[in-house]
Amino acid sequence: MDRTTDLVHCASKVRDISANIDLYRQYISLEPEAPYVVEDCRPAPSWPQNGRIEFRDFTLRYREDLPPALDGINLTITPGEKIGIVGRTGAGKSTLVKSLFRLVHGTTSGTLLVDGQDIGAMGIGDLRPRLGIIPQESTMFRGSFKRNLDPLQEHSIEDMWAALIKSGIAPKVSGQQQLFSLCRVLMRMRRVIVLDEATADVDLETDRHMQQLIRSEFSDRTVLTIAHRLETIMSSDRIIVMDNGRIAEIGSPQELIDAGGHFAGLVKANDFGA
Ligand SMILES: Nc1ncnc2c1ncn2[C@@H]1O[C@H](COP(=O)(O)OP(=O)(O)OP(=O)(O)O)[C@@H](O)[C@H]1O
């Protein structure tokens, strides 16, 4: 009986050890994060001043054996432009915006410039904090409300209150976390702001409130929006339709409606009318 117990004990130990080995293998196979700062390629403290984005023949593969998730993207977004991004699932929408933050691990070719600066050459510590993002799922961590809102402690309490009041976070019952992310972005007011399905989980009223705020507060900022609801991006200056890692359609909403392609189909299906 004792031997059986010993055997069971041993078997469970072996299972634990092999699970740890698997975990260790996963850790050592993780790609190292890019350098935080590259001394000879540091942007000016005021960068980016305008918010011009240029993808030049930009290709990204998550793995060598996979087809490109972005395939030869050539795109110039002018300062202050509002860009809506749509496309089927897996079309490359998230990869496109995450590339701006270098949040995707993979191999790239071509260049991605923000205000003339090659973002692939600089450290991620000089890149990521200079751009704004409202992701689909906001990160909250243990700590005070203020610490969550301003983790780097860059802002005054007045700035924080101004952002909180503008966002209308207090009386809202739904979308609190998204409004919290909006507050963070409102406090920092970066030149380039990305909304990656930011309002997918909020109700229509909160979505409209956020869009209205983005239009008024970020009127001179470059804003890229991947939208769950078509309504969210109908007032964009230009719409990009992604398909299979490529830009399939690009133009103003009306131009794309007139062209009668994928976007026009979406508009019709959503009963927006031409
Ligand atoms: N971490 C990853 N590793 C490998 N392939 C990935 C990874 N993330 C995305 N892909 C692939 O890259 C392509 C583009 O994905 P991406 O998430 O950018 O599309 P999407 O248009 O944002 O889709 P969705 O609307 O579903 O979010 C897809 O073929 C997807 O399967």
Image: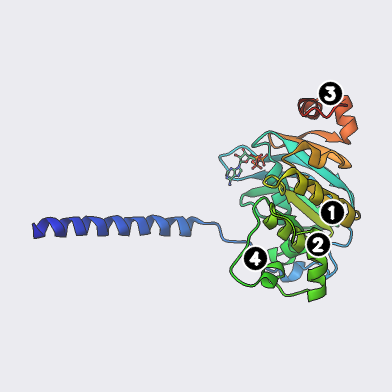
* Residue ID at (63%, 60%): 139
Nearest to N terminus: mark 4 or mark 3: 4
Q: Where residue 245 sits in the image (x, y, percent)?
A: 70, 37
Sequence-wise first label, 3 or 2: 2
Comparing marks 4 and 3, which lies closer to the viewer?
A: 3
Report which residue position mark 4 lands on: 35
**Which residue is the site of mark 1?**
213
User: Is 164 above or below relative to 136?
Assistant: below
Q: How far apart, in angstroms, are the residues tagged by discs 1 and 2? A: 9 Å
Can you tell which of label 1 and label 2 is closer to the viewer?
A: 1
- Residue 115: % across, % down: 86, 57
Question: Which of the two discs, 1 and 3, sits closer to the camera?
Answer: 1
Write down the quadrant of residue 226 in the picture: top right
The spot of residue 52 in percent (x, y) is 86, 53
Within 10 angstroms of label 2, few (less than 14), some, or many (20 or more) residues? Answer: many
* Residue tagged 2: 186
Q: Residue furthest left?
A: 1
Measured from the top left, where is residue 198 in percent x and y?
71, 49
User: Rounded to the nearest whole Å, what is the CA distance between mark 1 and mark 3?
Assistant: 31 Å
Residue at label 3? 260
Given contact means CB atoms under 8 Å apart, are the residues at marks 1 and 2 in contact?
yes
